[in-house]
Amino acid sequence: MVQMTINGKVVKAPDGEMLLTVIRRQGIDVPALCDHAAVEPCGSCRMCLVEITREDWNGWKKYVTSCLYPSENGLIVSTHTPELQEIRRNIMDLYLARCPGSELVQKMAEEYGLTRTSYKTIPEGDNCIMCYACTRICEVLGRNAISAVHRGHAKVISGPFDDPPPDCIGCLSCANICPTDVIEWHDQDGTRAIWGRTFDLISCRQCGKGIITRDFAEYLKEKRQIPADYFEICDDCKRVELARKMGGLVDLAKEVAS
Amino acid sequence: MAHDLAKIQEIINRSPQSPGSLIAVLQDIQREFHYLPCEALEATASSLNVPLSKVFSVSTFYNAFSLNPRGERIIRICQGTACHIKGADLIQEQLVAGLGLKPGETSPDMKYTLEVVNCLGVCAMAPVVVVNDKIHGGVRCDKALKLVKKD
Ligand code: SF4
Ligand code: FES
Ligand code: FES
């Protein structure tokens, strides 16, 4: 355990735990756009910036991304100084220019009093904030189907050679984790389309609803030792079935009791 | 364009077969072919055990790598501040007209590739034109075309 000061309060935390986690545990709300519990932090959005200093730094201080900065003894952390708020406001101003159509960005920008960007908006821009949550989750899943390609303004999330990614299994993890909902997909007639590819869906034996792509099911069966028949019935139907069984139990119990 | 896979593999094998060699291997391939052929990226990915998506990401990130075939002679016109002031625009005009290429383009006979860069760190020599790895300083716009063609 190490001891630090956060906004004037003495706080204990496990050595090396990232500052953002510690700060949040204190009930302090530091904004973060690229942080997600399912993936390693990557420090891309810069919103979680905090100010740190130490007794022996003689008044010297610096800004660090709290999602990537490990706790250490003697740190003095400030999370909401006027300078930090100004930096965050500027970042949101830039995000507004890049992703004017994103509701999340609009909402966060509004918290800094911004309703429109003071920069030029990117005309052909999409709502991607380049947080890499999608590529990181794809890596966690062991697929690495997509990555950030090209550089600067031209950077986009895409498959190798800008083609539909051959390693994609249509699991939707990227689309689900994306904070600004920019990854397009749709299910139709027993198939799922995403990243320019089309996958077969396994349909629920009972209600016929698409459950999961065949490729994803195969992958899970192999990697996670999931029973072969696990994906034959959808979660909703499983719940109904369970409820029916439970209901039967209740009736049985009543019978026994009477 | 089909490439000698054996040659590609030979280049890859020069480095330790681990993900840490990625950039070194790509540099060696770039040096050999003047660009990174698709087959080479695929072979690199499987040999070094790096996902192809990551190899592509790295290849498109660095300016030193090109995914398009480049000419035998790569001409870089510096358009950094110092060179700009010393007339890099005029040099560019001459070369664009003389070679019939816009910046970023390669001649159909694969002889020349014209590129524009921002400051090569030798501002004292401005204006600067680099032909392959040779730096030419104090380039005169009336001599520029001759310079890139001869040397
Ligand atoms: S597509 Fe979504 S998850 Fe992926 S980098 Fe862009 S904003 Fe982040
Ligand atoms: S949450 Fe730390 S940089 Fe995005
Ligand atoms: S500006 Fe051309 S070398 Fe610096």
Image (cartoon, coloured by chain):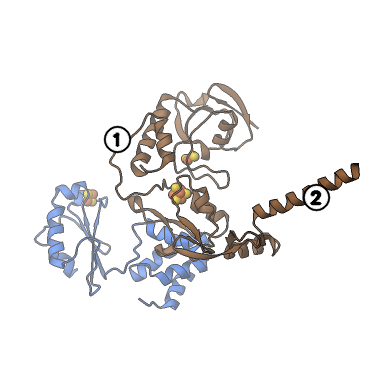
Q: Is residue A139 shown above or below A45? A: below
- Which residue corresponds to the image point at 72% horizontal and 54% vertical from the top-left? A241
Label the blue chain with its letter.
B
Q: Position of residue B8 (x, y in %)?
A: 43, 73
The residue wearing badge 2 is A248
Label the brown chain with its letter.
A
For this rendering, which residue is in front, A106 or A142?
A: A106
Q: Which label lies toward us, 2 or 1?
A: 2
Q: Is residue A227 left or right of residue B22?
A: right
- Which residue corresponds to the image point at 47% horizontal and 26% vertical from the top-left? A80
For this rendering, which residue is in front, A129 or B19?
A: A129
Q: Amino acid at mark 2?
A: Gly
Chain letter of disc 1?
A
Q: Is residue A96 left or right of residue A191?
A: left
Say yes or no: labels 2 and 1 on the same chain: yes
Chain letter of disc 2?
A
What is the number of the mark on residue A118? 1
Q: Is residue B14 visible?
A: no
Q: Is residue A255 shown above or below A163? A: above
Q: Quadrant of residue A234?
A: bottom right
Q: Position of residue B91 (x, y in %)?
A: 14, 57
